[in-house]
Image: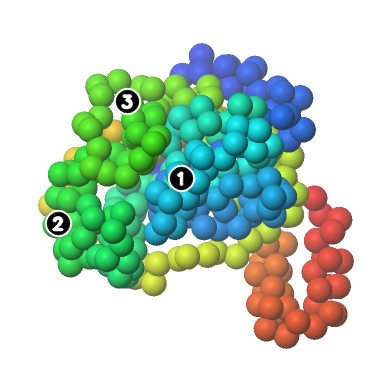
Amino acid sequence: MAADNTRPLSQEVIRHIVSSFNPEQDARAQKQALVFMHVPKTAGSTLKWIIERQYSPSHTAVIESEDLLEQYRAFQAMPPEARGRLECVIGHVPYGVHQWLPQGARYITMLRNPVAWTLSFHNYMRSMPFFDTHPDLKVFHGVRALDLNGFVSFLEDSNMADMQTRMISGEVDVTTTLPPYMRLSEDALERAKHRLRDEFACAGLVERFDESLLLMKRRLGWRHVYYRKLNVSRDRSEPRNLPRHTLQRILACHRRDVELHDYAGALLAAQIEAEGPGFERELRRLRRLNVMYDRLVPLYEASGLLRLRRALRQAFATTD
């Protein structure tokens, strides 16, 4: 399931990828809003921080927190002309939220190895007490006490298995968004693949975060995409350390997400190849400068010294 083990796409799909991208159509100047579909526990906090630097706060709607339902209702209650002025929507929102955006929307998202996703989500829920107390999250009450096998059973019983397929295919009620959900339809996986290929500006992989980020930067006209990793789980359980029967159970639980993750990896690889040789040079520069950024920013935040601010500006102002 890792990105370098994905099944290759057909030549027909690759030709479609190469021929369908129109820089003028997909440039940032386009009037459509950008929707960042943040599937939980897919490096979304880091990407959100990058995206928020690209768009005006007054033209950005954020829909994610323990008060998700309240934020979602407030978004839906906005006057249409106010939603029509939005440049960006960020949050735990499924495909379909564009129906609330009269200017139309382009989607981006990140996918993650389903086993790693399950471990991370389980660890996250165990660390957050509000899952046991929040009145809008009653479906999660008691889940924090479950071991990993119990958590997988909860995912199955609440139809949260294959969550990435569910959100991208659009099989989430856009008026509520929270589980329990109806069972996924038989064609959910194929619809999710179709949308990734034909309707998303970019769908990245957590395992190839830098490549995904650079592709988004190029396609969406972003600048200054240097970052520090945010909201990283302290308990970094590794899929390779799982007992075989537990690993097999998680893979069976997320069988559609396993295939979708493989497909997204092959799609990403084809899109990167279509970018040409300059992509790899820019990727090396991004990684090199991001090391510098990661070292300088904590010093700047801790000291507030103007000289560090000037150093950052000098280092990064001419690199994009």
Q: Nearer the viewer, residue 10 or 112?
A: 112
What is the quadrant of residue 94 in the picture? Answer: top left
Report the residue marked by disc 2: 149
Are dots 1 and 3 in contact, CB under 8 Å? no
N-term-proximal mark, 1 vs 3: 1
Residue 61's disc number:
none
Q: Residue at x 73, y 35 (%)?
A: 28
Reply above or below: 270 against 315: above
- How many residues crowd mark 2 within 10 Å: few (<14), some (14–19), many (20+)? few
Residue 118, image x and y in percent?
29, 53
Are dots 3 and 2 in contact, CB under 8 Å? no
Distance (Cα) linking label 2 and label 1? 31 Å
Report the residue marked by disc 3: 188
Residue 179, image x and y in percent?
27, 44
N-term-proximal mark, 3 vs 2: 2
Q: Mark 2: which amino acid?
A: Asn
Reply above or below: 16 against 206: above
Front of the two marks 2 and 1: 1
Distance (Cα) linking label 3 and label 2? 25 Å
Badge 2 element? helix
Front of the two marks 1 and 3: 1
Where, quadrant-wise, is the N terminus in this rendering? top left
Residue 215 visible, this orientation = no
Residue 78, image x and y in percent?
56, 40
Report the residue marked by disc 1: 72
